[in-house]
Image (spheres, grey):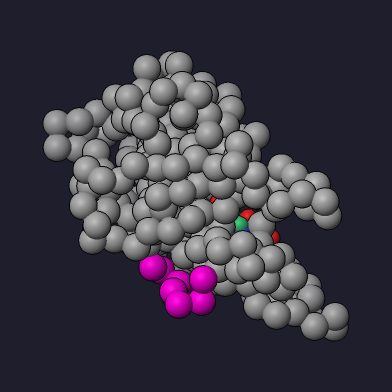
Amino acid sequence: MIGISIATKWEYEASLEYFSIKDNERFGYPYGEYFIRTIDDTELVFYSTGVRKINGVGGNQYMISKFNLTKVIVAGTCAGIDDKFSNLDIFVPDKAVQYDCTVKEIEPLIKQSFIVDIDLSKYGNDFYTGTIGTADKAVVMWKDYLELIENKITIADTEAGAIAYICKKNDVECIIIKGISDFPTEESNSDKFESNIEQINIYLENTPKVMNKIFGEYLKRFI
Ligand SMILES: Nc1ncnc2c1ncn2[C@@H]1O[C@H](CCC(=O)c2cccc(C(=O)O)c2)[C@@H](O)[C@H]1O
């Protein structure tokens, strides 16, 4: 069985809609909900975990143990960091890093022990790849965005790097498929809150579009 890990309720709702899931096919578990679908003769369990690293890791560890998963695919949205890319571009990163685990004033932002390399060689190369950076807070502030650019991060989220890390501990393959839902914008002091609300609205508008693109154009070749 392969697990499809989904963080937010909006991403999960878009998944329910995409696969036309009926109420009696939805089951609860301590971190959220799951449903099961067979695609190309492979059984997949789609589950919501809730947001940020603790929920992402807890939900995945639970599902790896419950269903004896052989692979986890993290599917969802992310912030765009590298400005060569645009909203709705989809990535399958070959590197996942946690960037909030060091004292950055005296240590490098990213330490080797928090980097997971992902071998994509058997899946071809007709997709965007790069480094996904994960931390427990969303990338909203311009100074955080500049720091990620400086550290050569391509996209950022709040779960994937930690999920890849615990998959490795479990000897379970982890593939991350993420689409850009939003980019941080430079905020001035006066419109900090407005610019944040605007970013959230863009995220909400793009979430179903990203999930449909992942399921329609990317999922099958990674299962
Ligand atoms: N900018 C982002 N940074 C990090 N992760 C992002 C971003 N965008 C999307 N994700 C991904 O989607 C989910 C939720 C998104 C989220 O929390 C968010 C999105 C936009 C603005 C704000 C805000 O507070 O203004 C919060 C997370 O689970 C994460 O995996």
- For the residue pair 204 and 84, the one nearer the viewer reads as 84
Residue 121 in the image: x percent, y percent?
26, 46
> In the rendered image of this protein, does residue 174 appear above or below residue 27?
below
Q: Quadrant of residue 34?
A: top left
| Residue at image location 63% in from the left, 68% down from the top | 150
Residue 20 at least partly seen: no
Magenta-span inclusion, residue 88? yes
x%, y% of residue 31?
Answer: 57, 30
The percent position of residue 191, horizontal first and vertical second, equals 79, 81
Which residue lies at the image location 53% right of the left edge and 34% below the top edge? 165
State which quarter of the image contains the N terminus: top left
Q: Is residue 165 above or below residue 29?
A: below
* Image-based side of 145 in relation to 124, left or right: right
Q: Is residue 109 magenta?
A: no
Q: How many marks?
A: 0
Query: Which quadrant of the figure shows ligand 1?
Result: bottom right
Q: Is residue 19 above or below residue 207?
A: above
User: Which quarter of the image is occupied by the C terminus?
Assistant: top left
- Placement of 50 over or under 201, stated as above or below: above
Residue positioned most to the left: 41
Identify the residue at image location x=37%, y=17%: 68
- The percent position of residue 220, horizontal first and vertical second, equals 21, 46
Residue at coordinates 51% horizontally, 71% vertically from top-left? 82
Residue in front for this viewpoint, 33 or 147: 147
Q: Quadrant of residue 152?
A: bottom right
Q: Which residues are magenta?
A: 82-89
